[in-house]
Image (spheres, rainbow, N blue to C red):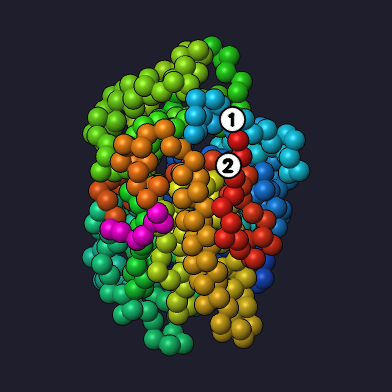
Amino acid sequence: METFKPAPQAEQAFDVAIAGGGPAGAACAIPLARAGLRVLLADGGGERAFRIGEGLPPLVRSLLDDLGVLDRVMADGHRPSYGTLAYWGGLAGHANDTLRQLHGEGLQLDRVRFDGTLRAAAAEAGCEVALATHVQIGDADEAASKAGARTETGAEPALGTGPVAGPGPDALPPPGAPHRLQLRRPGEPLSPVTARWLIDATGRVAAQACRLGASRRHYDRLLAFYQRLRSDTRTDLDGRTWVEAVEDGWWYSVLLPSGERVVAFLGDADLMDRRALLEDCGLWQHLQRTTHLGALCAEHGYRPHGATQGADACSAELDRAAGANWLAVGDAALAFDPLSSKGIGNALYTGLRAAQALLACESGDLQATERYADHLRDIHRVYRKQLQGFYAMETRWPDSAFWARRQAGPAVAQEAAPGPQAGKPVATLPWPPAQRTAARREAGSDKNPHMPW
């Protein structure tokens, strides 16, 4: 894939600049580039050997088909996922077999490969893809002063400080003027660009939207701690997603295309010893307290591989996902509890819908972006009601603060809790009830679905 090289001296003009080159940013870039707009897709992630966020539910295939990349993704060597085995609400396991469902199996993704495939498709559509490149709002002097303060990959700030305070609406360009931006690459001078539209695909930190005056609403304090495991036996062939509720939270695990298994523990930031979990073998020792998942790992001779990582996993949304010539997509706009299985599907869906809204606005429908923002607000409202129904099914620990919080009533917005660095993605589970087709998403639903087991 040929990549875009910013020019430090000459200011370059784009119709659309997209900050963030993950699934949401790429899904937005592809239709815009195909429509003939000059699009810049800036991915600030750099080279990564592993990235959490591996579940692709079966129904998400329709979104990949809309983007024209389904066949390529299916041929990319990802591992089939044939369902879920969940220990939730009781001692017995509940199996959900996707082989007997209309849309077939899901996938356990190699996220680095998956994200690269989407960026390559964007480049083929005519998009300029800039790797290891961060987008900052403002002229060179202002952008340079903030170069170390925050990046769209979420290096700063940590949770608990909230969004970095920016100039808010003052960062917006005058009516009719383009966004003035700076591209920052390691070891290179800032490169000026302009864009008539700016798309925030920077993940949970929502760097650009918060800079333009939006604010982030957090509904809980959920964190995820995850680690890869390796085994020399190669006897583990269980491609299902394993889920196990415990007194202080819940666990999940999947078998990756590499043959490694990833395990993740999810709990509330103020109820767990985060330092202990991040220490050598801390998460592994915590895993031994489980009944089923720990036994699975012992049966196949798994041992920890690499350091434990932490990630924000709370439910959150922007107070508005669109403004004057800007939109937010993916986790920047809406962030979901991994229990809902909406992560990658939400990224692809909001990327496509934002592109449609932008093109409609370009054609004279000036209310299109406002309807997009309203639609996302409705999605998150329905999701929070569904999530409460899911958690209410686990009643074994009435004295546990973690479970009592989730059974006390609908979640309300609260301050972010201290925890791992914001902006890092977290995995989603391939459970069908939380996934809906584009038509069903459009219509919305207030019904609480039954759990798939």
| Secondary structure of residue under mark 2 | loop
Q: Which mark is residue 451?
A: 2
State how many labels appear. Answer: 2
Q: Is residue 236 magenta?
A: no
Check disc 1 and give the amino acid type.
Answer: His
Left or right for 37, reference 245: right
Please state the extent of the stretch shown in magenta in the rendering.
Answer: 409-415
In the rendered image, residue 367, in percent from the top left (x then y), is placed at: 56, 82
Residue 133 rendering spot, x and y as whole percentages: 42, 56
* Residue 167, numbered label: none
Alpha carbons under labels 1 and 2: distance apart? 10 Å
Element type at mark 1: strand
Q: Nearer the viewer, residue 186 or 430?
A: 430
Horizontal relation, residue 290 to residue 360: left or right: left
410 drawn magenta: yes
Q: Residue at x 29, y 43 (%)?
A: 269
**Image x and y of residue 171, in percent:** 33, 77
Residue 307 placement: quadrant: top left
Q: Nearer the viewer, residue 427 or 246?
A: 246
- Picture residue at 41% right of the left edge, 65% below the top: 318
Circle 1 is placed at which residue position? 94
Does the magenta stretch mainly form a helix, a strand or a loop? loop
User: Disc 2 marks which amino acid?
Assistant: Met
- Do we see residue 16 in this rendering? no
Q: Residue at x 61, y 20 (%)?
A: 237
> Foreground residue, 12 or 205?
205
How packed mark 1 is, by other alpha carbons closer than 10 Å (few <14, some 14-19, many 20 or more), is some
Q: Position of residue 362 (x, y in %)?
A: 60, 81
The answer to the question of whether label 1 and label 2 lie on touching residues, with beta carbons closer than 8 A, is: yes
Q: Is residue 291 visible?
A: yes
Q: Is residue 211 above or below residue 1?
A: below
